[in-house]
Amino acid sequence: MNKVLVIVAHADDEAIGCGGTLLKHSDNGDKIQIIYMTNGISARNTLIQEKEQKEINKRLNAQQQACQLLNTDKFYNYDFPDNQMDQVPLINVTQAIEKVIDDFQPNMIYTHHGGDLNIDHRIVHQAVMTACRPQPNSTITTILTFEVNSSTEWSSTSIGDYFMPNYFIDISQLQTRKQQLLAYYQPEMRDFPHSRSIKAINILNQWRGNQVGLERAEAFMLIRKIV
Ligand SMILES: [Zn+2]
């Protein structure tokens, strides 16, 4: 049994980037925990307006439904400031992740690509890499980064390395269930042909599969593997 820890900036990143893969882990009886670093709506220490609170609640509700479908063992909601995680000392973000790693002792980590356009994604990647330093007795043997539509492909090489996947998970049989997962996050989705539309995510999964002779896949960069 694997102990899988997913660390994302926003609720919906996990569904877009590795939803099919997590469904597979869940089917295999693996234990999944997810850390959401921001509420995706507001900055911390600002007065939350009623409208904002409604949006936060809606997103929380979607997240809970997604976690239920994924049979998530536990999830954490941190309140780091949305789209402003660069305003927080990196050590605070790192320690928040380390705390969960200490408790859960995962062997697999899924997180953001370090070259994404979204600042929160990049900060989360840095903090995860710091929290997952390969020290003696670390339980972590696999670190994989995923792509998130309208952030990973919208970046440039002046921001960070381009996403070049070298690890593919076959999700050919999981299309309907991934679609269901994404449907919970409908308010975060845009209309096709926006790259952050359910149809575009589906097309990306088809293309990633086709790149390696499969019908559908989710693509990753393998950052570290210890066997
Ligand atoms: Zn995000």
Image (tube, rainbow, N blue to C red):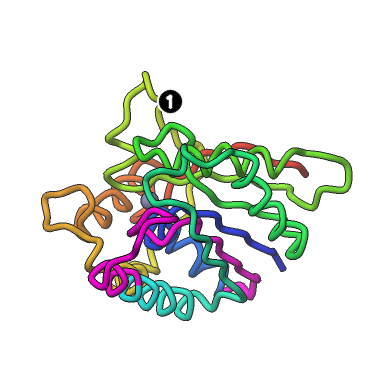
Task: Please state the horizontal and vertical placement of residue 41, each as a whole percent of the image.
Answer: 33, 59
**Picture residue at 12% right of the left edge, 55% below the top:** 192
Task: Please state the horizontal and vertical placement of residue 126, each as a whole percent of the image.
Answer: 57, 37
Quadrant location, the C terminus: top right
**Picture residue at 36% right of the left edge, 40% below the top:** 118
Whether residue 33 appears in magenta in the rendering, the answer is yes
**In this image, 185 relative to 144: left or right?**
left
Task: Please state the horizontal and vertical placement of residue 104, each as a whole percent of the image.
Answer: 73, 64
Question: Which is nearer the eye, 174 or 118?
Answer: 118
Q: Residues within 10 Å of mark 1 (few under 14, many from 20)?
A: some
Image vertical order of residue 41 relative to residue 157, above or below: below
Element type at mark 1: loop
- The residue that label 1 is drawn on is 160
Classify residue 211 by image quadrant: top left
Whether residue 148 appears in magenta in the rendering, the answer is no
The number of numbered badges drawn on the structure is 1
**In this image, 36 relative to 147: left or right?**
right
Which residue occupies the extreme top position in the image?
158
Q: Which residues are magenta?
A: 27-56
Image vertical order of residue 159 relative to residue 184, above or below: above
**Picture residue at 27% right of the left edge, 54% below the top:** 201
Asked whether the viewer can see residue 206, the reply is: yes
**Picture residue at 55% right of the left edge, 61% below the top:** 35
Task: Please state the horizontal and vertical placement of residue 173, each as a whole percent of the image.
Answer: 39, 68
Image vertical order of residue 221 relative to residue 23, above or below: above
Q: Which three-letter amino acid code belongs to the residue tagged 1?
A: Gly
Quadrant location, the N terminus: bottom right
